[in-house]
Image (cartoon, rainbow, N blue to C red):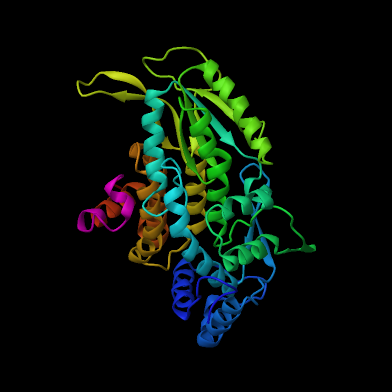
Amino acid sequence: MKGTKGHPITKQMVWKAYKKVRANKGSAGIDGTSLEKFEADLSKNLYKIWNRLASGSYFPPPVKEVGIPKKDGNTRYLGIPTVGDRVAQMVVKDHLEPELDPKFDTSSYGYRENKSAHDALERARRNCWKYDWVIDLDIKGFFDNINHELLMLALKKHTHEKWVLMYIERWLQVPIHTKGGIKQRDRGTPQGGVISPLLANLFLHYAFDKWIRKTQPTVEFERYADDIIVHCKTKDEAERIMVEIEKRLSECKLELHPEKTKMVYCKDSNRKEEYSEIKFTFLGYTFQPRLSVNRTGKGFLNFSPAISEGAKKNITESINELRIHKKTESKIEDLAMELNPKLRGWINYYGKFRKSALYQIFYALNKRLIKWVRKRYKKLTTSIGKAIGLLRRIYKTNPKMFAHWNLVRP
């Protein structure tokens, strides 16, 4: 069976999409159907999606709005589609992405195969050494404000398949189910939607990437979704280009956040000018002047990244929420099994640059483990020294028990 006039939508496409949705996990949408419940009648559910997609009769249900508190006290809203709708979106994404992705700029890193946040950070690090000034861009409510008309114009540059255009238009217009009721949308694409990152990359490919390459050839940039860092040679150039960027985004119906967008001077041993802003945060890392040591042992000031204070705080809060010292009925091996997946994730991501910045967090974690030892073994309650001794003996027997012990020993 074929689509409305175009690429045939096969059962294999739906099956492949389902397997990706399953691997990504995720919570239930507005219908309350979890992955497990969806899989209880899998063949019927997948057949229904295929049949409706292929016949042109698929209409997405409303998106469930979920609020996530932000550090600044505000709330970030995610739109969670149903499991079935995530499968349908994945079918279209899998078909469209091979056409779009090769067209994207090499400095676009977000949500792309064979590109990662670490790649973006490494490129930013090197560009900060080459360029003296940075524009740290923050687009106000980007996902909520993507202009549908401009997005569809961009999409039509790459596909004329009516079924693709029809379904994407339906997803863009699907209402959001909030606590206060149904909210209609005339702009934006919900964060949480399977196809939203691809559409966001397409929009900014034309709104920013291609434009800046053409009009500002002297600068470099890194973009990860809507997180953008622009590198300039001089302060005058940075001031001029910041104005041009604001004008360009305004033409594309977007707005720079006036308080979060800023110019930064990449101060180090060779760049000694005075300026009010000498650090910025990108993808959980803060770039700023840091004391380093060269091969001869001589100290110098280097503009480089390390885990941000915000990320440190988030990790510490995550560890605190586990309340390790209260789990006195657990064995230490059980604690390790619970902690290690999180620890490995943090170390792998935030240990890429200046791993030593993680030590403080893991010293505090070892203190929590010492507290657990003292609570679990009554004989050690009054002796911190003996509790530390026991933990050290465990470490000598199994130094890899906790993932962070290769960085900070107990």
Boundaries of the magenta span: 395-408
Q: Position of residue 340 (x, y in %)?
A: 36, 58
Residue for point 57% across, 82% down: 51
Query: Furthest residue to the right?
Result: 180
Q: Is residue 139 visible?
A: yes
Decide whether residue 398 is among the magenta residues.
yes
Question: What number of labels is visible?
Answer: 0
Position of residue 261 in the picture relative to residue 399 (left or right): right
Decide whether residue 255 is among the magenta residues.
no
Q: Is residue 397 above or below residue 245?
A: below
Residue for point 41% across, 34% down: 124
Residue 361 quadrant: top left
Position of residue 174 in the picture relative to residue 359 (left or right): right
Q: Is residue 75 visible?
A: no
Q: Position of residue 156 (x, y in %)?
A: 58, 55
Q: Is residue 35 above or below residue 381?
A: below
Query: Furthest residue to the top?
Result: 273
Residue for point 59% across, 68% down: 163
Q: Position of residue 203 (x, y in %)?
A: 58, 47
Q: Nearer the viewer, residue 237 or 180?
A: 237
Q: Position of residue 29 (x, y in %)?
A: 63, 70
Residue 54 quadrant: bottom right
Position of residue 394 in the picture relative to residue 108 (left or right): left
Q: Is residue 87 above or below residue 387?
A: below
